[in-house]
Image (cartoon, helix red, strand yellow):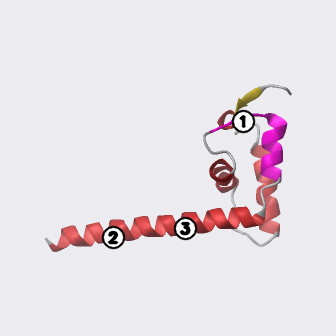
Amino acid sequence: MKEIKPVSEWKETLTPVLLSKQDEFRLLGYRSATAEDIWRCVNKKLWKNNPEKRLHEAVQDVLHLSNNQYVSYITVEAYQNDDLMESIKAVDSGSSEK
């Protein structure tokens, strides 16, 4: 397939590849790995600004995602989400004291 599309348009087509990568990560011990997390990781780490790619290029990017890249992404996301939740709690506790 020689068609070039923005990677966001390949998501549905890439579902089997994402599920395969999910299975690989789970076999490596990352039990909470999901296809959606892998999709977000590849988008954020490799495909900034939604580049245009051929299908085989997008498949290759997903299959070559290393467990180190994935763990790095998950760790950063966890820290960012923790900070957000702490900020929300701080705002909530500050407003309840007034």
Residue 45, percent from left and from top: 66, 53
Separation of residues labelled 1 and 3 (CA atoms):
27 Å
Residue 67, percent from left and from top: 76, 65
Separation of residues labelled 2 and 1 (CA atoms):
38 Å
Residue 75: quarter of image: bottom right
Majority secondary structure of magenta residues = helix
Residue type for callout 3: Ala
Query: What residue is pinned by disc 2?
Result: 89
Residue 48, percent from left and from top: 63, 45
| SS class, disc 2 | helix
| Magenta highlight range | 50-63
Classify 10 Å Cα crowding around label 1: few (below 14), some (14-19), many (20 and above): some
Residue 26: quarter of image: bottom right
Mark 3 and mark 2 lie on one chain; the one further toward the N terminus is 3
| SS class, disc 1 | helix
Taking the spot 25% from the left edge, 72% from the top edge, the residue there is: 93
Mark 2 and mark 1 lie on one chain; the one further toward the N terminus is 1
Residue 44, percent from left and from top: 62, 51
Identify whether 76 is placed above or below 63: below
Query: What residue is pinned by disc 1?
Result: 10
